[in-house]
Amino acid sequence: QVQLHESGPRLVKPSGTLSLTCTVSGGSVTSRANYWSWIRQTPGKGLEWIGHINYSGRTNNNPSLKSRVAISVDTSKNQFSLELSSVTAADTALYFCAGGAGFLDYWGQGTLVTVSS
Amino acid sequence: DIQMTQSPSTLYASVGDRVTITCRASQSISSWVAWYQQKPGKAPKLLISKASSLESGVPSRFSGSGSGTEFTLTISSLQPDDFAAYYCQQYDSYPYTFGQGTKLEIK
């Protein structure tokens, strides 16, 4: 059974960079069947797809976040990561990592990241 | 971006009721729709993919239908465990997008 777990700082200063890592167990980030995604959730905007990466490192990101998003994969650690730069209070959200073939089979438990000085 | 419009936003129902949630896409997305259930403090759980394919382990009282721009999630006989929030998601085109959610509450 594939399990995902997010880790990273819960508090980020405005204009800083939000960095989260998702560790995959029970499966491999090199699986050709899955994309590895980041999603965030806020009371105001609901669920927002941030982007995903595949086994070869190919990414697709949400244009609403412009060029602030970088998603990478570390096959040696079976992890994938999110970096979101130039954060503001609007980036305060519950961040989930997830995996699946477009639809999202597997989800982490989510981590609340607050942007505040 | 493809907009996914869910209705209703809140649905009041009783145990045993049959309920239907609708999701309309702003353009045709074939059958590339998934449905999720989310309980407070938890991650969403995949119920249905490709509009009507029930995930393993999901009770058969859940069903999905539709294609093109209109999709429905039906729960045939509500159980106490079903009171939660439900979301649709399209994965036809980037960026993937979600509906705003339907909160299913006890009447």
Image: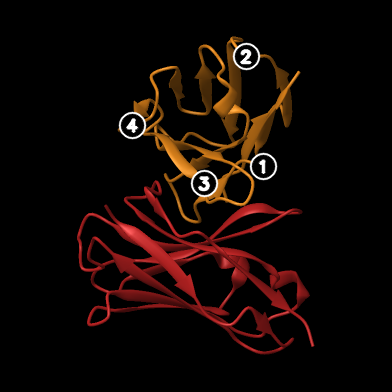
Q: Which chain is orange?
A: B
In percent of the image, x 40 and y 49: which residue is there? Answer: A104
Residue A24 position within the rendered picture, expressed as x and y whole percent measured from the top left = 32, 67
Q: Are marks 2 and 4 in contact (CB under 8 Å)?
A: no
Measure how far apart labels 2 and 1 are at the Cα level. Answer: 24 Å
B42 to A25, vertically: above or below: above
In percent of the image, x 40 and y 23: which residue is there? Answer: B59
Residue type, label 3: Pro
Q: Colour of chain A?
A: red
Residue B91 position within the rendered picture, expressed as x and y whole percent measured from the top left = 43, 46
Measure how far apart labels 1 and 3 are at the Cα level. Answer: 13 Å
Q: Earlier in the sequence, mark 1 or mark 3?
A: 3
Q: Do dots 1 and 4 share one subunit?
A: yes
Q: Residues within 10 Å of mark 3 (few under 14, many from 20)?
A: many
Q: Quadrant of the C terminus of chain B?
A: top right
In percent of the image, x 44 and y 17: which residue is there? Answer: B61
Quarter of the image where one finds residue A30: bottom left
